Amino acid sequence: MFPIAAGALDRIDPFHLTAFRYLVATAIFVALLVAIEGRDALRPDGRTLELFLLGTLGFAGFNLLTYVALEHTRPQDAALIVATAPAVTVVATWLVSSVRPRGVQLLLTALALLGVALVISRGNPADLAGGGVGAWELLVLGGVVAWVAYTLGARRFPGFSPLRYTTLTAVGGTLIIVAITQGLTWAGELTAPGGNDLVANWWRLLYVVGPAAVIAVLAWNDGIRRIGPPNGALFMNLVPVVSFAIAVAQGYRPGAVELAGAGLTVAALVAANLAGRRPARGPAQVGTRASGAGWPANAAKSRA
């Protein structure tokens, strides 16, 4: 998604791009939910506000922050930061549940963040402290934190299938995205893209709506149901690998420090994930920690 979306941002601002993406994707989610689970599945069961807030975090927070950052940072850098979601989940779960991760997990998480710092600072992590680089990457990290909060919130809806939770939260998140976009447009801060802009990016728009939103979410949820959250979390670590490969195919030549930083991040995240699945603290807690990269175990079971 990141390399393709970055190309569309040349003519479509991140707010209108996100609004278009999720207006269409949410309509498809609603249609699928009604077709598969019936109209009753559209009822929030008295939890409208909670679903609205979680949708605001997951869809508006993650996507707007990430797309705004993509106007100023490289797609492979954004992808590398998004891949830290499992590590961020370890820390978030610790803060929320007081379940302290193993020391080795914290060490590996720190190594993963060091790898990110090496890549986005071009080998000079000290420059991050001076604000010379990394400001826009922090927006991506903020989006990751919002997505982690959204994902952990799914544990509060064990009776909802992944499709139902996705759809009902997407509705609220999309309303916020559209409201923010329209407000900025009316205020003169944004200019709505013209027909020529949409036509020039038609295949990018199709991709961010179809494969990158609808198909990706459905495939991810079905994969989590089949192999479980711990194994599913490992695939998040392929995000920067794929993004770097696309960038290289487009002619980019990463330096040795970038490759070393990306390799360190992926290796540390995989090792941290594997360490988190060891049974020392009981399978229930392990599953909870790993669920940050996908759906929680109880939600996956409810769908099954």
Image (spheres, rainbow, N blue to C red):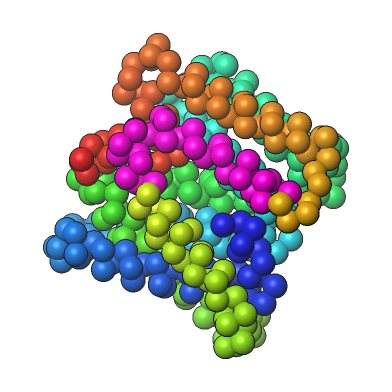
Q: Taken as a whole, is the magenta stretch helix, strand or loop?
A: helix
- Quick one: 20 or 226, which is closer to the camera? 226
Question: Image check: 122 left or right of 81?
Answer: right
Res. 174 visible in picture: no
- Quick one: 1 or 140, which is closer to the camera? 1
Pinpoint residue 246: horizontal percent, then vertical percent.
66, 51
Instruction: Single out the residue that lies furthest toward the top.
Output: 280
Residue at screen point 26% across, 55% down: 164
Instruction: Single out the residue that lies furthest toward the front.
Output: 249
**10, above or below 108, in the image:** below
**94, above or below 206, in the image:** above
Pinpoint residue 93: horizontal percent, then vertical percent.
45, 32
Q: Quadrant of residue 24?
A: bottom left
- Quick one: 46 or 144, which is closer to the camera? 144
Residue at screen point 76% across, 36% down: 259
Question: Image check: 162 left or right of 290?
Answer: left
Numbered range of the magenta stretch: 220-248
Pinpoint residue 9: horizontal percent, then vertical percent.
65, 70
Residue at screen point 83% across, 35% down: 256
**184, above or below 75, in the image:** below
Pinpoint residue 5: horizontal percent, then vertical percent.
60, 64
Residue at screen point 56% across, 39% down: 238
